Image (cartoon, rainbow, N blue to C red):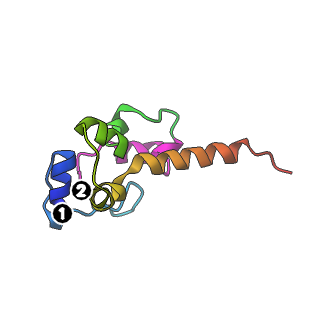
Amino acid sequence: MSDGWRKYFGFRIPAEKIDCEGCRTDTPVLIDAECPVRPCVLQKGLEHCAECGEYICEKLRGRIVDRAELEKKRGEGIPEEDYLCFIRPYENFLRLEELRNNRSTCQDRSLP
């Protein structure tokens, strides 16, 4: 994992420190102690960034993982095996977009 992150994201984290429980856990184990997203989510009382009226803000933009953007930035495709191992588990852009779209769909429905 550490090697894959170095290759695609440009930083290395020792394997034993790759552990993040997410923004809403009571006792977080954070990969990035300087992450600006978690304090923002907690301060606003949100479950995730997709609920925010400022989505996608600069705080989140710096932490977005999106295969298409990575490929564009690198100027080449990402092999499927690398995608599945190093990128897909952390591809938050697709998950946030899905959450946002589901939220919009639910809000648009009227109750019988």
- Farthest bottom residue in view: 16
Labels 1 & 2 near each other (Cβ < 8 A): yes
| Amino acid tagged 2 | Ile
Q: 10 Å neighbourhood of mark 2: few (<14), some, or many (≥20)?
A: some
Q: In the depicted view, which residue is nearer to us: 39 or 109? A: 109
- Is residue 38 inside the magenta stretch? yes
CA–CA distance in space, label 1 to label 2: 7 Å
- Is residue 92 inside the magenta stretch? no
* Residue 107 in the image, given as x and y percentages of width and height: 69, 44
Q: 10 Å neighbourhood of mark 1: few (<14), some, or many (≥20)?
A: few
Q: Please, what secondary structure does the residue beneath circle 2 have? A: loop
| Amino acid tagged 1 | Lys
- Residue where numbered disc 2 is placed: 31
Q: Residue at x 36, y 56 (%)?
A: 88
* Residue 91 in the image, given as x and y percentages of width and height: 37, 51
Q: Quadrant of residue 18?
A: bottom left
* Residue 22 in the image, given as x and y percentages of width and height: 37, 57
Q: Please, what secondary structure does the residue beneath circle 1 have? A: helix
Magenta-colored span: 30-51
- Farthest right residue in view: 112
In this picture, residue 35 sits left or right of residue 24: left
Q: Residue at x 23, y 39 (%)?
A: 74
Q: Residue at x 13, y 53 (%)?
A: 12
- Residue where numbered disc 1 is placed: 17
